[in-house]
Image: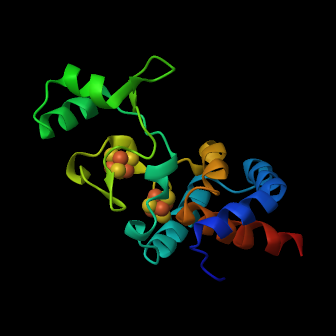
Amino acid sequence: MKLETDIKRIEELSQQRDDENWDFRCFLKRADLSVAKIDSIVHELYREVSAQIDCTLCGNCCKVMQPELTAGDAKKLASQHELATNDFQARFLHDNEDGKGFIFNAQPCPFLQNNRCSVYDNRPRDCRSYPHLHKRDFVFRMNQAYSNCSICPIVFNVYERLKQALWRTRRK
Ligand code: SF4
Ligand code: SF4
């Protein structure tokens, strides 16, 4: 299957395939496959796809996502900038709507420079984890993957391959 990396094309295709992607989400939630089996397929596809995609040529998540920061994340970033945590928060963060933690006060992220993370070693845990496909229990987090199809080329290509492997072949 062709690897798609053009983010504009990925946005278009995700829009065109929105109903299909949602149907696949519903199918997989009811499929007769164990959570562990699905995880192992997703993890393998994630390894295969992410090895072929250079995040430094993309940076889309840092442009359009709002990572959640913990107090610990804020403290580390404040320290890197030699600022008191309160001063750092006032300058770069907003309180998260759910009352837990923070989000950056600008989009794209204020620390994205020349498509690279300028605070890479101290980036928030949520950023380290994105696009979250290495985690367990994929089938319980499918709304996240479905939403990320139009944002992240890695997720888009893994989702396409997952549909091919688990759904299209069974429907033939
Ligand atoms: S902190 Fe770094 S990885 Fe996280 S959104 Fe900003 S630029 Fe991206
Ligand atoms: S994680 Fe996805 S959206 Fe973020 S830079 Fe890498 S390919 Fe792009």
Whether residue 29 appears in this view of the structure is yes
Whether 5 is drawn above or below 92: the answer is: below
Residue at 81 percent across and 71 percent down: it is 168
Q: Quadrant of residue 125?
A: top left
Between 120 and 163, the one lying in front of the other is: 120
Whether residue 132 appears in this view of the structure is no
Whether 89 is drawn above or below 128: the answer is: above
Tell me: 90 left or right of 129: left
User: Outermost residue toward the left?
Assistant: 82
Q: Quadrant of residue 159?
A: bottom right
Residue at 19 percent across and 36 percent down: it is 76
Between 3 and 26, the one lying in front of the other is: 3
Tell me: 118 left or right of 105: left
Residue 154 horizontal/vertical position (percent):
53, 65
Q: Quadrant of the C terminus?
A: bottom right
Residue at 49 percent across and 57 percent down: it is 60
| Count of numbered tags | 0
Between 72 and 171, the one lying in front of the other is: 72
Residue 136 horizontal/vertical position (percent):
50, 49
Residue 7 horizontal/vertical position (percent):
59, 66
Q: Quadrant of the N terminus?
A: bottom right
Tell me: 104 left or right of 159: left
Residue 122 horizontal/vertical position (percent):
22, 45
User: Outermost residue toward the right?
Assistant: 172
Residue at 60 percent across and 44 percent down: it is 141
